[in-house]
Image (cartoon, rainbow, N blue to C red):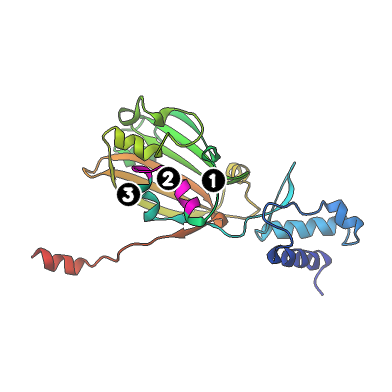
Amino acid sequence: MAPKWRELADKLAEQIKRGDYAPGQQLPHIRELVDAGKGSKSTVHAAYKALEAEGLVTSSRGHGTVVRQQVPLKRLGIARYDKAKWRDGDEVAFIADRVASGRSYQRNEQTQTVNLVEAPPSVAAAHGLPAGAEVYARARLVKEGEQPTHTLTSYYRPEHVEGTRIVDPAPGPAGRGGGFRVLYDAGYEIDHMKEAIFARAATPDEVKLLQLPAGEPVVELHRTTYTAAGTVVEFAIGVHAASRFAWEYDFKVPDTAKEREEQQ
């Protein structure tokens, strides 16, 4: 027979998946289940830890054990950078993801800090800068309600962004259209990007900042943004809670052989 904590965890998991406990709803306090005869304090605690390890709940001091959002956000690929969204409208990338996912949002769900820092090696290499060069680091923490979803730090050359809204540390996107619109207005229209993503274990600081359950990995993204002339105008590093996004890409399949034939 399965241990009592496992039986309790399975029953609670079934209730969560059935919708008896909605996303964001707090599960009963451990003492409530103990008093209801569901098991000892250690049994209930072990069941809750199992639910957390399985990604069904999060536990934190002051908030108790809360049911997690089970439908991940669509993290759009190419479509999230459509110029019509940020140049002609006000759908910055994280808002585009929410709209595509049918989820609500508030602009102040993105907080940020901006500092002039010495470029880390990967940033200096991306921008073609010498070691020790200074860059602006615009670090954002994005939440869905009270739930952090990811961090994103963009690095810019000072001569590209000095005096613009990008270096304004006020919470939220950098004005209408966000950072890409600021670059566009400054004469640096983005043309193409390169993204690299990989999964890794979360650091202790990331576990705390993103409120990750035990054992959940993160997906790290490196984004290099270019003008048509090949100038790098942004290098960004994002750290995403792995279970909170479904990555989606829609693109035309290249046919280089056909393209070569047409050029001959």
Q: Residue furthest bottom?
A: 1
Question: Position of 258 compared to 218: left or right?
Answer: left
Question: Position of 233 compared to 29: left or right?
Answer: left
Residue to which mark 2 is pinned: 91
Q: Residue 146 bears which disc, if any? A: none
Dot 2 lies on which element? loop
Residue to which mark 3 is pinned: 193
Quadrant of the snapshot with the N terminus: bottom right
Marks 2 and 1, how far apart at CA: 11 Å
Asked whether 182 falls inside the magenta stretch, the response is: no
Region in magenta = 86-99
Name which of mark 3 and mark 1 comes first in the sequence: 1
Q: What amino acid is found at the position of numbered circle 2 in the picture?
A: Glu
Name which of mark 2 and mark 1 comes first in the sequence: 2
When asked about the image quadrant of residue 248, the answer is: bottom left
Image position, residue 97 (x, y; %) = 47, 52
The residue that appears at 36% across and 40% down in the rendered structure is 180
Question: Position of 198 compared to 68: left or right?
Answer: left
Question: Position of 140 compared to 21: left or right?
Answer: left
Dot 1 lies on which element? loop
Residue in the foreground of this view, choosing between 253 and 3: 253
Residue to which mark 1 is pinned: 105
Q: What amino acid is found at the position of numbered circle 1 in the picture?
A: Tyr
Dot 3 lies on which element? strand
134 up-or-down from 12: above or below: above
Residue 129 visible at all: no
| Badge nearest the viewer, 3 or 1 | 1
Name which of mark 2 and mark 3 comes first in the sequence: 2
Estimate how packed mark 3 is, as few (under 14), some (14 to 19) or many (20 or more) residues with alpha carbons within 10 Å. Answer: some
